[in-house]
Image (cartoon, rainbow, N blue to C red):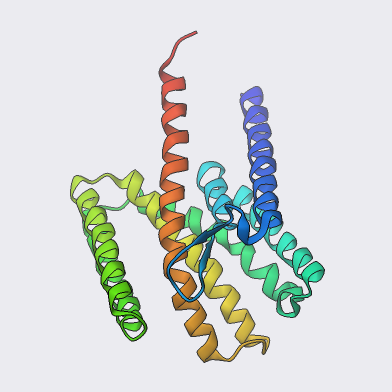
């Protein structure tokens, strides 16, 4: 029993170390690297720097998520000092909000796995309203872009509903963890920027719309792919004999 607990602790430390290194590498490579994925919005890029935090939290629990959020925040704060980005030199903006990414993602994942299809349908309805508002906002910028986004988002929501009817809660929970973790990062950082006087509320709202939705989509895809593959490997290992 003691050996098992030691192995679990070592595993958590290793996972936190590896994912922390990935966060640092993605940030160091900058917009030209895989940490920033091009998207057809005014923001031009969707960041993936917070995704390892979500993955670590889902795989190893809220403590690992908290540690990875701290690594993400400290790196962001340090990088802002090097690049001279004043607003992110404030630790209340760069570090504090990032501490909650893994905690909320883990909580959403753990809670949703225990719910039924009606909760999933309700969540799909909320997603439809939010995505509809985003598409309506994009119509004023580019009608063709809004049509493409509407088709993509409807397909994603339809897929979520299909999974809900099949009661495949694992994939739903991963999607929810990716979305909640990403929105936690976006909303809390923008809120602190407004509270600390770096951005007016109107600018924060525009930044949230243009950055938030693409980052949610990208994060959900990566979280499902990575965690799903990892859990599949673990399942095969558990079922194998030596």
From the top left corner, tell me how far across and down residue 86 is, in percent: 75, 79
From the top left corner, tell me how far across and down residue 173 is, in percent: 37, 51
Residue drawn at point x = 57 percent, y = 78 percent: 190
Asked whether, in this view, residue 73 is left or right of residue 201, the answer is: right
Q: Is residue 118 visible in the rendered structure shown here?
A: yes
On screen, residue 172 above or below 125: above
Q: Nearer the viewer, residue 150 or 157?
A: 150
Q: Which of the 4 quarters of the picture holds residue 16?
A: top right
Residue drawn at point x = 71 percent, y = 64 percent: 76
Q: Which of the 4 quarters of the picture holds residue 102?
A: bottom right
Asked whether, in this view, residue 210 is left or right of residue 50, the answer is: left
Q: Quadrant of the N terminus?
A: top right
Q: Which of the 4 quarters of the picture holds residue 189?
A: bottom right
Q: Residue furthest right?
A: 82
Q: Nearer the viewer, residue 72 or 83?
A: 83
On screen, residue 90 above or below 33: below
From the top left corner, tell me how far across and down residue 226 is, in percent: 47, 41
Asked whether, in this view, residue 126 is left or right of residue 231, the answer is: left
On screen, residue 168 above or below 218: above
From the top left corner, tell me how far across and down residue 18 is, in percent: 66, 40
Q: Nearer the viewer, residue 80 or 99?
A: 80
């Amino acid at each position: 029993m003691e050996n098992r607990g030691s192995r679990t602790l070592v595993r958590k430390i290793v996972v936190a170390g590896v994912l922390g290194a990935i966060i640092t590498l993605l940030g160091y490579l900058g917009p030209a690297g895989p940490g920033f994925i091009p998207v057809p919005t005014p923001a031009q890029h969707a960041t993936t720097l917070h995704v390892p935090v979500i993955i670590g939290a889902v795989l190893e629990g809220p403590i690992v998520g908290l540690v990875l959020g701290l690594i993400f925040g400290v790196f962001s704060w340090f990088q802002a000092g090097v690049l001279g980005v004043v607003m992110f030199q404030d630790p209340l903006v760069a570090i504090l909000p990032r501490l909650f990414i893994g905690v909320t993602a883990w909580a959403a994942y753990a809670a949703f796995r225990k719910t039924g299809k009606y909760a999933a349908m309700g969540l799909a309805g909320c997603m439809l309203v939010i995505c509809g508002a985003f598409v309506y906002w994009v119509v004023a910028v580019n009608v063709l872009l809004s049509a493409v986004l509407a088709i993509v988002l409807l397909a994603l929501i339809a897929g979520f509903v299909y999974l809900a009817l099949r009661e495949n809660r694992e994939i739903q929970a991963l999607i929810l963890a990716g979305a909640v973790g990403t929105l936690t990062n976006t909303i809390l950082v923008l809120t602190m920027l407004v509270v600390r006087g770096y951005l007016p509320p109107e600018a924060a709202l525009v930044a949230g719309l243009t950055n938030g939705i693409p980052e949610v989509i990208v994060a959900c895809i990566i979280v499902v792919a990575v965690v799903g593959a990892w859990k599949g490997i673990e399942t095969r290992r558990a079922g194998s004999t030596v």
